[in-house]
Image (cartoon, grey):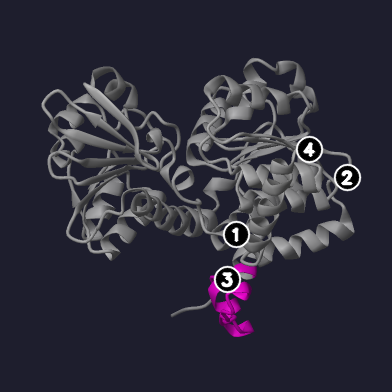
Amino acid sequence: MSAAEESLSDQGLLRLNWAQRAMPALVQIRERFERSRPLDGLRVVAALHVTPETANLMLVLQAGGAELHLAAANPLSTQDDIAAALANRFGIDVQALRGADRATYDGHLEQVMTAGPHLVLDDGCDLVGRLHTTHRELLPSVLGGCEQTTTGVVRLRAMSAESALSFPVIAVNDSPIQQSFANRHGTGQSTVDAIIRSTNVLLAGRTVVVAGYGNCGKGVADRARGLGASVIVTEVDPNRALEAVMAGFRVLPMLDAAAEGDVFVTVTGSRGVLAEPHFAAMKDNAILANSGHFDLEIDVAWLHAHCVDLRAGIRPHVDEYLLADGRRLLVLAEGRLVNLAAAEGHPPAVMDVSFAGQALCVEWLAANAGTLIPGVYDVPAQIDHGLAVLQLAAMGVRIDTLDPAQEAYLTSWRYGG
């Protein structure tokens, strides 16, 4: 190991420990796992963002007895010092490099796959997809998995509907506490943080266009409005569009919003959300960011092919595309997840809840997978409830409890008014 690698490991360890201070739920689970060893003899293969928060989840699973193999879910979200600390200080197999090209990134996923997973932790259905296409020979040994993202859950449900899914997978992303706590508050804060870090733009008085009003979009819209921006929401779902209107946001088709926006944030999980017709309508110096999932929400390929000049890296994580009419469009983080590539992702306190849920779901799968049929499962209710209790305790918040008379009144049909 080189001196540079040693130095990266030391820095990564410091950052890992700093994040741990804000992750009390994971600390409690780690202490219990050290005693009970619920994952002894199991290989866990994960494709996740390699961050200090993820590192703390890996250490919890390792404490439970798991053999770990971790690949990056996104090359631009990888933090090399964290990867070095996990590999060199804790002996975990990590295949990740910040800024890796597509071939290297694919190679990392292939490398961890060869371990032969018993349990899979996925981010966007990358591992599950590979298992069902190019690595079907490994399927018989897979007990189950967890999926962290909205996009991944959508794909898994499609697989399940076609009877193509070969093992049980827990939709961690669909947990009520994950939706309200991590997706809304975590994505909202980290996305706005990334935009400001990258550009130093003053959001007050600007028009921010948020594409998608799911839980992540709600968080971005709320945070942008809180900093003084005028927020426009675009949607394809009438229920969500109505919800945005009732929350006080303007709702427009993207083609109309394109002419008004100063900053655009896509949080849909779809593709082509910002494309040629929208680029044609945008103002000079419009800022384009993606906080959905894959780098297809903004059609960066079209900009590459049709710009007359590209000034890459005019600021860290900012590429300027000069169009033929003289307008400049600023794309953040190459159209990849801006909150992870240009900032630090969700704060540790948010990921404490999310990854505590992951750890408990892995434990539950290890204990119950033999009795489950293939399909997509909700997070068990007792786990979701327990996470809320743990987080409130960590925040020092106390709540009321029902007395026996109230409990009886709310659970019986025999009482009148």
Residue placed under numbered mark 4 in the picture: 1
Q: Secondary structure at mark 3?
A: helix
- Amino acid on which disc 1 is placed: Val
Q: Amino acid at mark 4?
A: Met
Q: Are marks 4 and 3 in contact (CB under 8 Å)?
A: no
Question: Residue 353 — which label?
Answer: 1
Q: Is residue 287 magenta?
A: no
Q: Which residue is mark 2?
A: 40
Q: Nearer the viewer, mark 4 or mark 1?
A: 4
Q: Residue at x 47, y 42 (%)?
A: 341
Sooner in the amino-acid sequence: mark 2 or mark 3: 2
Residue 112 spot, x, y in % from top left: 72, 28
Distance from the alpha carbon under mark 2 to that under mark 3: 41 Å
* Label 4 packing within 10 angstroms: few (<14), some (14-19), many (20+): few
Amino acid type shown at disc 2: Asp
| CA distance separating discs 1 and 3 | 29 Å
The reply to whether dot 4 and dot 2 touch (C-beta < 8 Å) is no
Going from the N terminus, do you reach mark 4 or mark 3 first? Answer: 4
Q: Kindly identify which residue carries mark 3.
A: 411
In this rendering, position of residue 2 left or right of residue 412: right
Q: Residues within 10 Å of mark 2 (few under 14, many from 20)?
A: some
Q: Quadrant of the N terminus?
A: top right
Q: Nearer the viewer, residue 260 or 413?
A: 260
- Which portion, as a residue range, is magenta? 390-413
Dot in front, 4 or 3? 4
Nearest to N terminus: mark 4 or mark 2: 4
